[in-house]
Image (cartoon, rainbow, N blue to C red):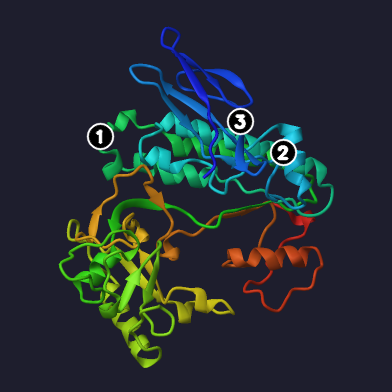
């Protein structure tokens, strides 16, 4: 465990506080974020590690409340390589200053747990978005020939956390009057549309522009605990005297358990030779159990509404191909729109309730039946293919650059119109 001390001196009269770290002293007003602050952690034996974080002053009275973002690897002085080439993160930091480097830098759980309010979370999202825009336009300027790609996470984070305001009766927004709900998602898409317009102004007529998402979004209003269903239907057993289990299957009796779920969509058989205490024999027994579970779970009904919470259960052996199929779950649960694996279920917890309301700010999701959440594809040239898929992107790029396609690619290259026939 690494620690770094800091000092807070509140000034209630001015609604601000002075914060001192090992390297900096700065003042924040209530409701204000700091810049990225470099923090030094002593690792012992003369070693130290550096990270960056932001401070947010929530209030100074009656209690002092300060929120600190998760610590990010410092891109200007990375203790671990976070870019390729390694110097690229340093180049960006020198050009634009420090920036977020965590894979999911926006602190969604701070909003879930009401540590941050909507405005503070949005400020975090758009600050990171601004940094990413700067990186994109710098890359566009520097890339005279070749491929330039940039990922924007903001649309994902904002839809996860603010979908509740799009629905009349979402459980996580029932206390907020309709006329007081912020139009966060429509505003975000206006911003993204403006970004696409600015990119189109910068590129020339020979440049192919693709705007791609890997999924869409739907409401997440109701939680489904498949482990609870498995327990109630005799597929998962608990230790004597237990009616529920804590996280990570704490009270599960594996000697009598045939199936379990962990994570967002995966359903696993307790297979002999794979699981430490497996009891299901691979082959005919396992195949029969998979078909039995698929038949019973497909169309599973939420008693509160009469709606089906599951639209399909996919057999991974029939769905996936390739050298890593053995690493996949045995079955994939395809939830209906409005439903998703419960917060308890993803942690391997067994509860008494199969269905329950989702009361967290994380109110939109895409970990459901993939047919219900297709991504988008926009292009400044016509694409002749009727059903383009995201697995086609890599072979399309290779073909455009005249690179031979490897034989192990799942997708196929699109038929893209030449630049002279472009339509916008």
Helix, strand or loop status at disc 2: loop
Q: Which mark is residue 423?
A: none
Circle 1: element type: loop
Q: Residue beneath label 1, please? A: 175
State the SS at label 3.
loop
Distance, label 1 to label 2, CA atoms, is 44 Å
Residue 284, given in percent of the width and then of the height, sits at: 36, 92
89 vs 343: above or below: above
Q: Nearer the viewer, residue 420 or 297?
A: 297
First reached walking from the N terminus: tag 2 or tag 3: 3
118 in relation to 391, above or below: above
Q: Residue at x 58, y 37 (%)?
A: 128
Q: Quickly name the residue at label 3.
A: 36
Q: For mark 1, does the 10 Å Cα neighbourhood hold few (<14), some (14 to 19), or many (20 or more) residues?
A: few
Q: Is residue 202 visible?
A: no
Nearer-N-terminus badge (3/1): 3
Examine the rendering and report whether any part of residue 206 can be seen: yes
- How far apart marks 3 and 1 lie (CA) works out to 35 Å
**Which of the two discs, 1 and 2, labels the residue nearer the N terminus?**
2
Spot the residue most to the right: 144
Occupied quadrant, residue 114: top left
Which one is in front, 239 or 410?
239
Give the residue at the far bottom of this rendering: 284
Residue that mark 2 sits on:
76
Label 1 close to label 2 by CB (< 8 Å):
no
């Amino acid at each position: 465990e690494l620690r770094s001390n800091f000092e807070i001196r509140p000034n209630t009269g001015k609604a601000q506080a002075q914060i001192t770290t090992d390297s900096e002293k700065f003042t924040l007003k209530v409701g204000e974020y700091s810049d990225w602050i470099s923090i030094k952690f002593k690792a012992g034996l003369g070693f130290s590690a550096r990270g960056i974080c932001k401070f947010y002053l929530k209030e100074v009275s009656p209690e002092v409340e300060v929120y600190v973002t998760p610590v990010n690897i410092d891109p200007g002085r990375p203790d671990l390589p976070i870019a390729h080439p390694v110097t690229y993160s340093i180049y960006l930091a020198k050009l634009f200053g420090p920036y977020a480097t965590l894979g999911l830098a926006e602190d969604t759980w701070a909003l879930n747990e009401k540590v941050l309010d909507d405005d503070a979370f949005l400020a975090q999202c758009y600050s990171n978005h601004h940094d990413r825009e700067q990186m994109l336009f710098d890359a566009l300027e520097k890339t005279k020939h070749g491929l330039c790609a940039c990922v924007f996470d903001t649309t994902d984070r904002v839809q996860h956390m603010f979908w509740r305001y799009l629905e009349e009766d979402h459980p996580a927004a029932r206390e907020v009057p309709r006329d007081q709900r912020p139009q966060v998602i429509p505003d975000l898409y206006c911003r993204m549309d403006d970004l696409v317009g600015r990119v189109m102004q910068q590129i020339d007529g020979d440049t192919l522009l693709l705007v791609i998402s890997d999924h869409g979004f739907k409401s997440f209003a109701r939680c489904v605990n498949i482990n609870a269903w498995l327990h109630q239907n005799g597929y998962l057993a608990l230790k004597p005297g237990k009616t529920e289990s804590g996280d990570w299957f704490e009270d599960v009796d594996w000697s009598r358990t045939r199936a379990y779920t962990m994570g967002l969509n995966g359903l696993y058989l307790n297979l002999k030779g794979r699981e430490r205490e497996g009891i299901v024999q691979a082959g005919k027994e396992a195949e029969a159990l998979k078909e039995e579970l698929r038949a019973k779970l497909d169309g599973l009904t939420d008693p509160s509404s009469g709606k089906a919470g599951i639209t399909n259960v996919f057999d991974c052996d029939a769905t996936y191909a390739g050298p890593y199929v053995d690493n996949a779950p045995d079955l994939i649960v395809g939830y209906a729109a409005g439903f998703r694996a419960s917060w308890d279920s993803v942690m391997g917890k067994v509860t008494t309730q199969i269905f329950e309301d989702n009361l967290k700010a994380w109110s939109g999701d895409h970990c459901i039946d993939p047919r219900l959440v297709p991504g988008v594809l926009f292009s400044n040239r016509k694409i002749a293919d009727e059903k383009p898929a995201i697995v086609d992107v890599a072979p399309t790029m290779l073909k455009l650059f005249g690179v031979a396609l490897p034989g192990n690619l799942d997708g196929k290259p699109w038929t893209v119109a030449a630049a002279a026939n472009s339509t916008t």
